[in-house]
Amino acid sequence: DTGVSQDPRHKITKRGQNVTFRCDPISEHNRLYWYRQTLGQGPEFLTYFQNEAQLEKSRLLSDRFSAERPKGSFSTLEIQRTEQGDSAMYLCASSLAGRLTNTGELFFGEGSRLTVL
Amino acid sequence: AQKITQTQPGMFVQEKEAVTLDCTYDTSDPSYGLFWYKQPSSGEMIFLIYQGSYDQQNATEGRYSLNFQKARKSANLVISASQLGDSAMYFCAMREVGTYKYIFGTGTRLKVLA
């Protein structure tokens, strides 16, 4: 399978605990995105990377959230001191950006569902 | 600031009929891309169709077409010959070329009736 993969698919945690999600993008894709989606809503932009550089971070992302893409390949999204409001689906997507790209559409993983009790 | 608006929370269509899902957008950037994605109950977002702001013709991909009206800032998705498997959430999205950030609308839930 050469698509975007996310791990874990489901995470249940207690309030106050830290959680980390991993995303492995399509190997040749240079851009990687994190989105959060709550029930019945569209994906909300959190942050994105070009290679290893984090280019933009949403104001939605509090100081408890941090994302990394250390070698420009996989990425991690960590949430510290989780709160019940953090319960959501966390979606990772990747794309190939460049002059030769025609549309640059996002390719999404299946998401990591977080439930904070 | 960029904004995507989908005003139809839910739509019903009879199998084999055509359906139009509405999307309007707002941007000050003259160069942008518009996308439609399908999200079945399994959760994975599936890319359907793309329209560039400078494209002269409306995009088509199989049973999907995009009715692009630039002056009205609308990019409606038309699904022809609806199938039961088309039942899903549909999201309109926009990317400004300068930022490569994608924003999404709130979605429309489509139910195809047998």
Image: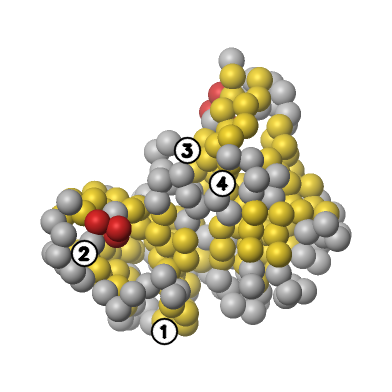
The reply to the same-chain question for discs 4 and 2 is no
Callout 4: helix, strand or loop?
loop
Callout 1: helix, strand or loop?
strand
The reply to the same-chain question for discs 2 and 3 is no
Q: Nearer the viewer, residue A31 or A40?
A: A40
| Mark in the foreground, 4 or 3 | 4
Residue B97: % across, % down: 66, 74
For residue A107, side relative to residue A117 (left or right): right
Q: Residue B98: in sight, yes or no?
A: yes
Give the alpha-carbon distance from disc 4 to disc 2, as whole Å.
Answer: 27 Å
Query: Crowdedness of circle 2 by 10 Å Cα count: few (<14), some, many (20+)?
Result: many
Give the alpha-carbon distance from disc 4 to disc 1, as whole Å.
Answer: 30 Å
Name the quadrant containing residue A90: bottom left
Please give the chain letter of the residue carrying mark 2: A
Q: Of callouts 4 and 3, which one flags the residue occurring earlier in the amino acid sequence?
A: 3
Residue drawn at (58%, 54%), measured in percent from left and top?
B105
Give the alpha-carbon distance from disc 2 to disc 3, as whole Å.
Answer: 28 Å
Asked if the residue at tag 3 contacts the one at tag 1, i.e. Cβ–Cβ closer than 8 Å, the answer is no
Q: Which residue is mark 1?
A: A53
**Amino acid type of the residue that numbered disc 2 sits on in the rendered structure:** Thr
Query: Crowdedness of circle 3 by 10 Å Cα count: few (<14), some, many (20+)?
Result: some
Q: Which residue is mark 2?
A: A82
The reply to the same-chain question for discs 1 and 2 is yes
Residue drawn at (41%, 65%), measured in percent from left and top?
A34
Q: Is residue B97 above or below residue B73?
A: below
The mark found on residue B107 in the picture is 4
Please give the chain letter of the residue carrying mark 4: B
**Amino acid type of the residue that numbered disc 4 sits on in the rendered structure:** Gly
**Amino acid type of the residue that numbered disc 3 sits on in the rendered structure:** Pro
Q: Which residue is mark 3?
A: B40
